[in-house]
Amino acid sequence: QVQLVESGGGLVQAGGSLRLSCAASGSGFSINAMGWYRQAPGKQRELVATITSGGGMKNYVSSVKGRFTISRDNAKNTVYLQMNSLKPEDTAVYYCNTYPSSRWDWGQGTQVTVSS
């Protein structure tokens, strides 16, 4: 079973940047499309960004388009999320998993807190 470990979160002021990483152990990473998801307090988990297995196609939810960039390094079994121009409404726990169905067990996530 693949394990997912997210990192890179933290406390940042509005307008700041963070780069999240998600490392996957085990096999199968390179053949799966991946997604970054987030869950804010009291809200359901939402999909933020996706990337195809080879990295050639990326998609974003409208609220982060132009500010966030998803990328991956299949040699390192890692997917990244570069987040710029952060807003308080980006505050959430961020997770990665396969897309469109989240087939692997969820990791612990990484907390992103954006202060105004």
Image (cartoon, rainbow, N blue to C red):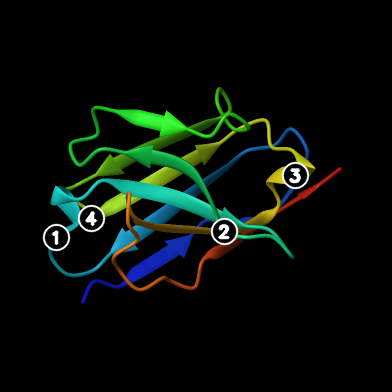
Q: Mark 4 Cα within 10 Å, few/some/many (few <14, many 20+)?
A: some
Answer left or right for 57 relative to 31.
right
* Callout in the foreground (4, 2): 2
Q: Name the element at disc 2.
A: loop
- Which is more toward the observer, 8 or 87? 87
The CA distance from mark 4 to mark 1 is 9 Å
* Mark with earlier residue (4, 1): 1
**Residue 96 location, x and y as percent?**
41, 57
**Residue located beneath label 4 in the image:** 77
Amino acid type for the residue under numbered disc 3: Glu
Q: Name the element at disc 1.
A: loop
Q: Residue furthest bottom?
A: 1
Q: Name the element at disc 4.
A: loop
- Label of residue 80 in the image: none
The CA distance from mark 3 to mark 4 is 29 Å
Image quarter where the N terminus lies is bottom left
**Residue located beneath label 2 in the image:** 45
* Mark with earlier residue (3, 4): 4
**Residue located beneath label 3 in the image:** 89
Q: Residue at 35% across / 68% down in the picture? A: 4
**Residue located beneath label 1 in the image:** 28
Answer left or right for 36 relative to 38.
left
